[in-house]
Amino acid sequence: MAVIPAGPESFLINTIFEYKIMPPYNSALEDIKSRLDIVDIVSEYVALKKAGQNYKGLCPFHTEKTPSFMVSPSKQIFHCFGCGSGGDIFTFLTRHENLSFNEAAIILAKKAGVTLKKSPHDAARAGEKETLINLNKDALACFQKSHSHSPEAASYLKKRGISVEMQKSFSIGYAPGRKDALFSFLKGKGYTAELIKKAGLVHYGSSGNYDTFRHRIMFPIFDLRGEVIAFGGRVLSQHDEPKYLNSPETPVFNKGRVLYGLNLAKEFIKKSGHAIFTEGYFDVIAAHMYGLSSAVAPLGTALTQEHGKLIKRFTEDAILVFDGDEAGVRAAKSAAGILLESGLNVKVLPLPRGEDPDSFLRKNGKEAFNALLENPVSVVEFFLMQKADKHLTANEALEVISKVPDSIRQGHYIKLLSEGIGINEMFVREELKKIKASQLKGAHRQAPGMKPLAKQGPSHEVYLLRLLLNYPEKAERIFESVLMEDLEHPVIRSVFKRMKEGMMDYDVLFSECLDDEKNLITELSFRADFDDAEKALGDCLNRFKKERRQRLLNEIQDKVKKAESKKDARLLRALQIEQQKLLGLKGH
């Protein structure tokens, strides 16, 4: 078992991981970190550009227009100077993917090629997710078997023009009409009723358990690794409701962070340089069937910024191809704003009224669709194409433009809008300023606990911690001169205490720290070195001495007042002598 100093995260690691090969350091975290480069990890989620010795990009943890997110390859840390968030590869993955520390460590260990053994507690937790995925696999097998025995399902898919090849590629199945067909099948596989319910595949009613999906064409939903995590079902009968039904959210499924078809489309998106966003299952399948294999769709919900971030891992360009009716236009407008805010370059491919990608492709074929795809319109042009009041259209477009983080792209959109509505660009920019000011008033400036912490602390305390982090050889002198009670800022005091207790190694210290402490450490680690570290240290220590004397003088003054009120002449004389000594020291 790897030996790790006691602490919140290191305790978790000690209880979870046992190495088959002894790591080169005394920390399990260090072994994983030594094999991975934080720049490579972060680059999977954020577009980074070289900035001196570091890398810079737009922060994935808050919306910003000017990059303030820094990554240090030498120190293997990141820090955002906009929202104050900072950490290492473990912190980044836990925050970005909304994972527990243990889940992030397991993923990174796999990337690093480190074999880990889980504790019984964590194995049970991870085991539940694995069991749910296995349960979904068995459910899919049941749906596919039922499909092979259902002429009605086969007839429906044939009518919709879905080839047998595409049915296999997307693993399409069929949920039988019997109320407990799937439940009985899964019970026979050894799964408990409780687990089947947790997977969202069964409900409990007055007459007992009944399947969530009945008499429906079934579309399995896969994660990027190709694991079945949920299902969507489409009714066969026009009288059944709802028309589409998706699995509820479960421990393995979050609909706001999954796109249908992305497991198949991701490589094509990289090759084509763009992602095609459609509205539904059949749109995606039809697009893939006609060779447009970069098509994806949200799962019965509006697009989210998480969807945008997901696509940014593969491309910077998105093309919206929504239905040509009024609902499709509204959805496209909303989606454009969300994806633009995510930092994507968004264009729209308008379809004739009454058409969707599925119907258009089946009627007109691939060539006609490709002809449209060669000339998608900008978001601004799409707004201007709608038959509505000019000023209302301009305001709607400006609301979307205001969300664009790239100032150059935003300027381009403003120019297009100005020309499209025939109004001087200066007036359009003035209106945009008003919209931004209104948004700023209503927005929460920064989340609690995510403010740049160094700005909150006294400057000499911040300097002291910077000196400790960057000049560990001066630690002994600092610890001899500065007391815990000398520090006012709680986070600085907490980090100082850890270092004074012996955690001078950067990685060991970092593994022990809480989030606020990590945010502060990374912020200070990106600060430039002192021109004269010795002078900076001398000034700091002098400031601490002066403040300590002042505290003592204040305490004596309080005691003097009490002695005077009690008319204790002896105590008063002793206090006055002590006061004079301190005043004499203060003059030096």
Image (cartoon, rainbow, N blue to C red):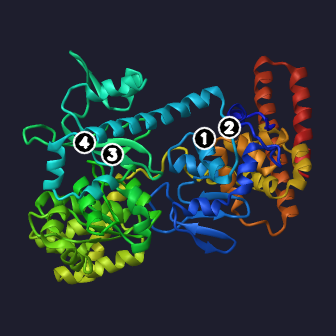
Check disc 2 and report the residue beneath it: 9
- Left or right of 346 in this view: 466: right
Amino acid bearing label 2: Glu
From the image, tell me which residue sits under label 4: 147
* Residue under the image location 23 percent in, 81 percent down: 418
Q: Which residue is mark 1?
A: 101
**x and y percent of residue 136 in the render?**
39, 37
Mark in front: 2 vs 4: 4
Distance, label 2 to label 4, CA atoms, is: 48 Å
Please tell me which residue lies in front, 150 or 485.
Answer: 150
Camera-near label (2 vs 3) is: 3
Mark toward the start of the polypeptide (3 vs 4): 4
Which mark's residue is nearer the viewer, 1 or 3? 3
Q: Is disc 3 placed on a helix, strand or loop?
A: strand
- In the displayed structure, would residue 320 be above or below residue 156? below
Question: Tags 2 and 1 in contact by the CB under 8 Å rule?
Answer: yes
Quarter the N terminus occupies: top right
